[in-house]
């Protein structure tokens, strides 16, 4: 079922009066996100993926085209807060998203803003913290947590609003490998167990591989999209646009170039090992 | 470094003091500070000391942390003690009717103020603290004072003090790595050497502020109207007792002052 549909959206940060020629940060993007889907959006810096993310919860409004979230147009000012309740946005820097001095009070910030009853807030906060495995840290000060832990608290803060969809704008960019792992596992769990739609903006290919669908953006446009297999099979296209492919895909691509007969492009190490074993027989 | 300072931290140990209404705690704190300036003899000082020890013990926080926060003011205490040697004990610096200010008095005041404010911040989370301020300032709404906005600003400031301190450390290290010299030269040179630290700090603080505002909007923040609180604060019997104590301490101090001739 269609949950978010982006229809031919253009957006530019330039002012109308700016003498320089307009460069659209998002340039005619059409995209849909289904309910319960895990979508990864990849592309290098400045390709418009973060700008697109901010369109999904009405933080930015398109210059032309429209974004429909669960039947509501984001341009409709009366629906702004309904949309933000349905689509939660997690930003890159975990430090700047935590607004209270205690973990549980920070998670409570969202439902407090919505005017939820105190008992219900308590219940939601506990549930959200348990969902991201941070319940035992509920009394801690945010600045004493690790990057991965902070980002999980930020996710819990969005979960407590009980959105149907979470959009994450490079949530792992400032984290170490451990923290990235924690965040990815949390997202996959939320998507599988609670059926929350996830839109993950990232530039790590190994994260994109775990999604149901990968959307590749370049210069404000959608370059290609499909299942991870379909997308990363197009090694040449991605390379042409200076994008990385997962290391295993790269290896398989080069081996094929040397005449090794591989049936497909592997995306994970296990797949790759299995395929190479087969080929060596 | 700066981050080791215990003063202003919060320790969630869930004691009787922790569960007190933060409004009661703030009012008691203010009363305490006033009262300490009115102690003129050993008996009233004893009353104050007794209550202070009682409160610190009830807070179930290791005395270690209280000593740590006292460490910060040791310099001031030593400095004023030295001055005391020259001026002689008990010479009033300032006198107005029955109120007189002596170095001894200032000592006691600093000591107890630090202990009491440590006790307040150790046992009250920043959110509770600002929440209580918001409630206490509510009457000011009549004169269109932005009560909610001020308390939100205070709670954000409290939240970001450690983050900005950490950032200052990083910037200082970065500038030192580029050869900045901050520890020598005369006063003007030293002040000037702070500029390369302050400018990046301000720039990053503004960027941060923009991010925080975005994050708050993403979490449906739209001002104080219609907000609820997870931890709603209620006055209970416990708070009644606390307020009674609030009255008893000044009363005890005043009685001591009247019954026993001034000590200084």
Image (cartoon, coloured by chain):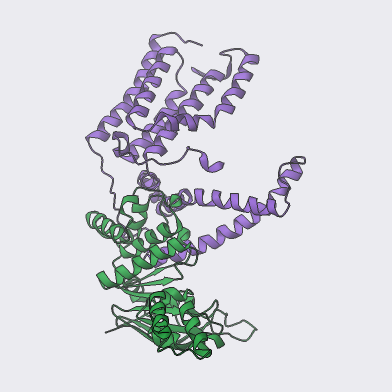
Query: Residue B30 in the image: x percent, y percent?
Result: 41, 33
Residue depicted at x 57% and y 80%: A14
Query: Residue A233 in the image: x percent, y percent?
Result: 44, 88
Image quadrant where one finds the C terminus of chain A: bottom left
Residue depicted at x 64% and y 51%: B173
Q: For residue B24, which quarter of the picture?
A: top left
Query: Residue A271 in the image: x percent, y percent?
Result: 38, 79
The foreground one among A241 and B215 is: A241
Residue A171 relative to residue B89: left or right: left
Which residue lies most toward the top here?
B261
Residue depicted at x 41% and y 88%: A264
Residue A43 relative to residue B199: left or right: left
The foreground one among A37 and B195 is: A37
Is residue A44 shown above or below B105? below
Total marks shown come to 0
Chain B shade in the render: purple
Residue depicted at x 47% and y 73%: A204
Is residue B12 shown above or below B98? below
Is residue B215 shown above or below A12? above
Chain A shade in the render: green
Q: For residue A231, which quarter of the picture?
A: bottom left
Query: Residue A166 in the image: x percent, y percent?
Result: 35, 71
Which residue lies most toward the front here?
A281
Image quadrant where one finds the N terminus of chain A: bottom left
Is residue B205 shown above or below B70? below
Residue A30: tell me if it is visible.
no
Residue A83: tell me if it is visible.
yes
């Amino acid at each position: 079922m269609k949950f978010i549909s982006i229809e031919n959206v253009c957006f530019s940060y330039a002012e109308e009066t700016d003498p320089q020629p307009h460069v659209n940060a998002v340039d005619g993007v059409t995209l849909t996100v289904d309910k319960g889907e895990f979508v990864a959006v990849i592309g290098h810096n400045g390709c418009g993926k973060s700008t697109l993310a901010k369109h999904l919860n009405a933080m930015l409004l398109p210059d032309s085209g429209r974004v429909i979230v669960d039947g509501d147009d984001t341009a409709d000012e009366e629906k702004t807060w309904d949309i933000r309740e349905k689509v939660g946005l997690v930003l890159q820097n975990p430090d700047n998203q935590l607004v209270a001095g205690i973990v549980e009070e920070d998670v409570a910030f969202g439902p407090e803003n919505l005017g939820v009853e105190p008992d219900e807030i308590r219940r939601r906060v506990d549930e959200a913290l348990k969902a991201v495995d941070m319940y035992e840290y509920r009394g801690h000060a945010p600045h004493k947590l690790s990057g991965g832990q902070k980002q999980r608290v930020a996710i819990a803060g969005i979960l407590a609003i009980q959105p149907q969809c979470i959009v994450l704008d490079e949530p792992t960019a400032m984290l170490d490998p451990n923290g990235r792992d924690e965040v990815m596992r949390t997202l996959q769990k939320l998507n599988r167990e609670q059926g929350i739609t996830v839109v993950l903006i990232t530039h790590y290919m190994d994260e994109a591989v775990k999604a149901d669908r990968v959307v590749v953006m370049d210069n404000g446009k959608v370059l290609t999209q499909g299942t991870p297999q379909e997308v990363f099979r197009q090694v040449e296209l991605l390379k042409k646009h200076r994008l990385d492919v997962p290391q295993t895909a790269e290896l398989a691509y080069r081996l094929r170039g040397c005449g090794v007969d591989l049936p497909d492009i592997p995306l994970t190490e296990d797949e790759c090992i299995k395929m190479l074993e087969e080929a060596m027989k | 470094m700066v981050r080791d300072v215990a003063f202003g931290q919060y320790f969630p140990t869930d004691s009787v003091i922790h569960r007190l209404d933060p409004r009661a705690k703030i009012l008691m704190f203010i009363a305490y500070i006033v009262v300490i300036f009115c102690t003129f003899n050993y008996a009233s000082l004893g009353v104050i000391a007794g209550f202070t020890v009682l409160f610190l013990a009830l807070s179930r926080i290791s005395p270690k942390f209280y000593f740590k926060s006292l460490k910060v003011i040791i310099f001031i205490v030593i400095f004023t003690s030295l001055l005391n040697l020259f001026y002689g004990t008990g010479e009033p610096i300032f006198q107005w009717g029955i109120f007189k200010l002596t170095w001894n008095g200032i000592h006691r005041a600093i000591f107890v103020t630090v202990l009491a404010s440590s006790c307040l911040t150790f046992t009250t989370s920043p959110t509770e603290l600002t929440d209580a301020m918001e409630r206490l300032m509510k009457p000011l709404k009549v004169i269109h004072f932005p009560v909610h906005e001020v308390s939100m600003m205070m709670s954000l400031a409290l939240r970001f003090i450690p983050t900005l301190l950490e950032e200052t450390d990083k910037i200082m290290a970065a500038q030192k790595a580029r050869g900045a010299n901050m520890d020598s030269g005369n006063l003007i040179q030293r002040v000037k050497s702070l500029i390369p630290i302050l400018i990046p700090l301000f720039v990053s603080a503004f960027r941060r502020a923009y991010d925080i505002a975005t994050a708050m909007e993403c979490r449906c923040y739209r001002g104080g109207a219609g907000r609820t609180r997870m931890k709603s604060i209620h006055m209970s019997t416990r708070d009644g007792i606390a307020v009674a104590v609030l009255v008893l301490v000044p009363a005890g101090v005043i009685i001591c002052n009247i019954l026993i001739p001034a000590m200084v």
